[in-house]
Image: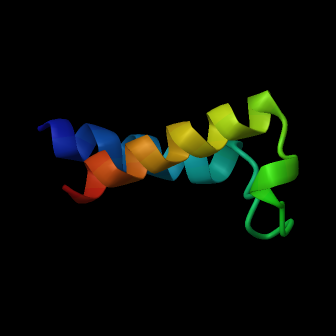
Amino acid sequence: MKQNFFKALAKLNKILLPSFSKQQLDLSKATKFQLVIIGWRVYVTSRALG
């Protein structure tokens, strides 16, 4: 049940949040807010897959 929730949340993230890989963002130059978004997307994706 949790995995289905995170799968839905991952789809919502894909629609709403920006993709920094498409923008070719350098992680060393990312702002704190951008790092928070990246961390959130990684967390949700890992939970959706596992």
- What is the x, y in percent for residue 15? 65, 50
Quadrant in which residue 19 is drawn: bottom right
In the image, what residue occupies the spot 48% across and 52% down? 11
In the image, what residue occupies the spot 73% across and 67% down? 21
Identify the image quadrant of the C terminus: bottom left
In the image, what residue occupies the spot 77% across and 29% down? 33
Q: Which residue is nearer to you in this view: 27 or 6?
A: 27
36 sits left or right of 11 in the view = right
Q: Which residue is nearer to you in this view: 30 or 4?
A: 30
Q: Is residue 24 above or below residue 12?
A: below
- What is the x, y in percent for residue 35? 69, 39
- What is the x, y in percent for residue 7? 33, 50
Q: Which residue is nearer to you in this view: 11 or 29?
A: 29
- Extreme residue in the front direction: 28
- Extreme residue in the left direction: 1
Query: Which colour style is shown?
Result: rainbow
Identify the image quadrant of the N terminus: top left
24 sits left or right of 45 in the view = right
Quadrant in which residue 8 is drawn: top left
31 sits left or right of 5 in the view = right
